[in-house]
Image (tube, rainbow, N blue to C red):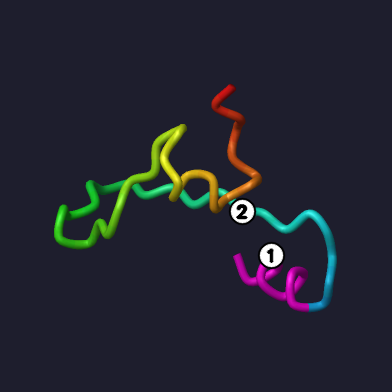
């Protein structure tokens, strides 16, 4: 993860990372879930297109 953050900070493209959790994420830790055709989803241009 640190390599992705440093790479982004110094301008390397593309910068991405996969984060995998082995345990369930408690519901109180989830702020929102973005779905295709949702304005929040469209804020992340790297996600698959919904068309």
Whether label 2 touches label 1, CB < 8 Å: yes
Magenta-drawn segment: 1-9
| Principal secondary structure, stretch drawn in magenta | helix
Q: Residue at x 67, y 54 (%)?
A: 16
Residue at point 56% right, 49% down?
A: 18
Query: To which residue does mark 2 refer?
Result: 17
31 versus 46 height, above or below: below
**30 up-or-down from 20: above or below:** below
Q: Quadrant of the N terminus?
A: bottom right
Q: Nearer the viewer, residue 13 or 33?
A: 33
Q: Would you identify the image quadrant in which residue 47 lies?
A: top right
Per the image, label 1 sits on a secondary structure element best described as helix
Residue at 84% across, 71% down: 11
- In the rendered image, residue 48, in percent from the top left (x then y), is placed at 60, 32
Left or right for 26, reference 7:
left
Relative to 48, is 3 on the left or the right?
A: right
Q: Nearer the viewer, residue 30 or 19?
A: 30
In percent of width and height, residue 40 lies at: 44, 50
Residue identifier under label 1 = 4
Of helix, strand and loop, which one carries label 2?
A: loop
Q: Is residue 49 magenta?
A: no
User: Mark 2 or mark 1, which has the lower sequence index?
Assistant: 1
- Mark 1 nearby-residue class (10 Å; few <14, some 14–19, many ≥20): some
Above or below for 10 versus 42: below
């Amino acid at each position: 993860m640190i390599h992705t953050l440093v790479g982004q900070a110094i301008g390397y493209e593309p910068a991405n990372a996969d984060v995998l959790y082995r345990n369930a994420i408690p519901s109180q830790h989830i702020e929102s879930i973005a779905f295709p055709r949702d304005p929040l989803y469209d804020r992340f241009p790297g996600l698959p297109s919904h068309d």
